[in-house]
Image: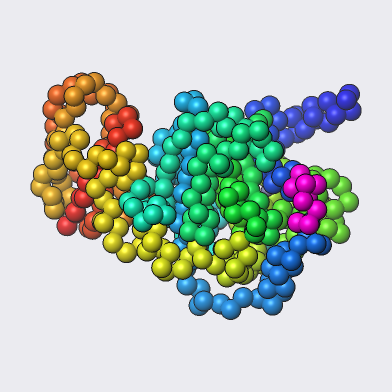
């Protein structure tokens, strides 16, 4: 115990991110989830697991390339909350999707900080994540679901209340991401099963995330990089392991253990941001998303290959997600306007609940907005593109009194011409309106 405290104290002193050890737990609980799973289900251990071996064989063979065509994956976020701060606003979800799309398309601005030694193998994965606009019954429903449940306090694999049973959409159509207060009942950030661990357990397939790691809630803090944990967890969802191998981060003697990726140098695992660190006789790829460091910047070409092979495989239905028919069925491509009246939250409000008028519409990027409230309310008005990404905020959580309100001359002259959706969000009601800029 004394020894542990000394090490912990030393860590806090040496870590560039001193509050990490106090406020936040480990970066990812996937290893603990695996250990527990293998104890309960020894048949799922890699050596006994046919799905695991099938994927490894496919990875060795390499996949049939689709000419670098982009993969699109429909995503559903289940916000399981107990009316606490874990009931995060939609904006944070859109931020999280933006971050994922930057990281998986090599558009993250910090890619320019990748050290020379790894610049040449930093990969553009070519996967785009889109929030679903239709549910599994084919009805218009935004893939941001809110459910009240005490399960939010422990999203752990062995918790008495199963967060995944509170809300779930079929995994052959959607990547399920559950947002909770505590992903592991403690200070954990998030976790996901590997595809080979859930082939026969579809309803637990997906990612559990603590809400404070979603979007830019930590912007400007030492923990700002923690918004990349979701990138790390999607890596697990697509069959990536930690780059140090199956053991615990930072354990010694892991230089012989491997992550099944050829171009990631062996390492013992690390948590700081030392990009000059050599733990196994070669430079560590400490900027890799599958490390635990505070400066994640990249996946490698080898990790890309592993993820794309997994996406092409029928193990755990990964190859069904990106099929065109599924993208149409989930509303992420094609006639998005079909679902522009009301998306989610309260699907029965087909009338115009705030008597909203946009004039003129179409406009030459300048227009007036009028809306009415029956009582004093907190209003958010935002503009999304056809993929559901928020690209402009007109007002954000501003109180307005009862009555009619006029917002003149809204200027969007810096936006491209095209079809957008103007969302008025009041309490739990969202009114979505078509906005055409010429
Ligand atoms: Zn992990």
Q: Quadrant of the C terminus?
A: bottom left
Q: Where residue 118 sits: x, y (%)?
A: 66, 62
> Residue 269, can we see it?
no
Measured from the top left, where is residue 78 in percent x and y?
48, 42
Q: Quadrant of residue 8?
A: top right
- Residue ID at (24%, 39%): 349
User: Start and end of the magenta stretch?
Assistant: 35-44
Give whichever of 116, 384 is nearer the camera. 384
Query: In which quarter of the view is residue 44 placed?
Result: bottom right
Q: Is residue 48 magenta?
A: no
Q: For the image shown, how many numbered marks are present on the structure? A: 0
Depicted 194 relative to depicted 179: above or below: below
Determine whether, in the image, residue 42 is placed left or right of residue 28: right
Rendering coords of residue 211 (x, y %):
53, 35
Q: Answer left or right for 226 relative to 22.
A: left
The residue that appears at 87% across and 47% down in the rendered structure is 252
Q: How is the image coloured?
A: rainbow
Residue 335 appearing in the image: yes
x 85%, y 53%: residue:
254
Q: Nearer the viewer, residue 200 or 218?
A: 200
Q: Quadrant of the N terminus?
A: top right
In the image, residue 286 lies at what x, y percent?
Answer: 70, 51
Specify whether 4 is left or right of 231: right
| Vertical relation: 265 (above or below) 428 | below
In-front residue for pair 129/38: 38
**What residue is shown at x 32% (from left), y 29% (from top)?**
427
Magenta span main SS = helix
Q: Residue furthest left?
A: 360
- Residue 155 as seen in the image, left or right of residue 72: right
Looking at this view, is 297 or 401 the one in front?
A: 401
Q: Is residue 40 magenta?
A: yes
| Image-quadrant location for residue 301 | bottom right
């Amino acid at each position: 115990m004394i020894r542990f405290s000394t090490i912990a104290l030393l860590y806090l002193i040496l870590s560039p991110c001193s509050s990490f050890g106090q406020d936040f737990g480990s970066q990812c609980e996937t290893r603990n989830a695996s250990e527990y799973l293998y104890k309960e289900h020894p048949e799922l251990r890699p050596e006994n697991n046919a799905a695991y071996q099938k994927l490894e064989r496919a990875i060795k063979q390499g996949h049939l390339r689709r000419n670098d065509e982009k993969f699109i994956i429909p995503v559903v976020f289940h916000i399981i909350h107990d009316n606490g701060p874990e009931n995060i606003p939609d904006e944070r979800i859109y931020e999280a999707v933006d971050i994922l799309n930057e990281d998986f398309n090599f558009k993250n601005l910090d890619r320019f900080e990748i050290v020379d030694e790894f610049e040449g193998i930093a990969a553009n994965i070519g996967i785009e994540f889109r929030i679903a606009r239709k549910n599994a019954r084919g009805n218009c429903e935004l893939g941001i679901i809110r459910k009240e449940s005490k399960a939010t306090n422990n999203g752990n694999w062995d918790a008495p209340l199963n967060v995944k049973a509170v809300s779930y959409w079929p995994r052959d159509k959607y990547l399920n991401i559950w947002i909770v207060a505590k992903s592991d009942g403690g200070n954990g950030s998030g976790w996901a099963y590997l595809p080979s661990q859930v082939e026969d357990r579809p309803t637990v397939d997906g990612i559990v995330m603590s809400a404070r790691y979603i979007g830019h809630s930590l912007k400007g803090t030492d923990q700002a990089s923690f918004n990349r944990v979701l990138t790390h967890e999607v890596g697990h969802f697509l069959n990536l392991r930690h780059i140090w191998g199956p053991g615990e981060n930072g354990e010694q003697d892991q230089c012989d253990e491997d992550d099944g990726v050829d171009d990631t140098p062996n390492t013992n695992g690390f948590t700081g941001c030392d990009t000059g660190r050599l733990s196994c006789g070669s430079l560590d790829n400490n900027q890799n998303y599958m490390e635990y460091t505070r400066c994640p910047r990249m996946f490698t070409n080898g990790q890309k290959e592993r993820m794309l092979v997994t996406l092409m495989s029928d193990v755990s239905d990964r190859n069904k997600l990106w099929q065109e028919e599924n993208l149409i069925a989930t509303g992420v491509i094609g006639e998005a306007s079909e679902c522009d009246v009301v998306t989610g939250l309260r699907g029965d409000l087909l009338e115009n609940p705030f008597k909203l008028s946009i004039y003129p519409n179409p406009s030459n990027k300048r227009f007036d907005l009028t809306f009415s409230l029956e009582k004093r309310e907190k209003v958010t008005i935002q503009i999304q593109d056809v993929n559901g990404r928020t690209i402009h905020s007109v007002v954000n959580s501003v109180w307005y009194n009862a009555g009619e309100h006029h917002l003149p001359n809204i200027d969007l002259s810096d936006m491209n011409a095209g079809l957008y959706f103007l969302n008025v969000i009041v309490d739990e009601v969202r009114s979505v309106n078509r906005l055409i800029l010429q």
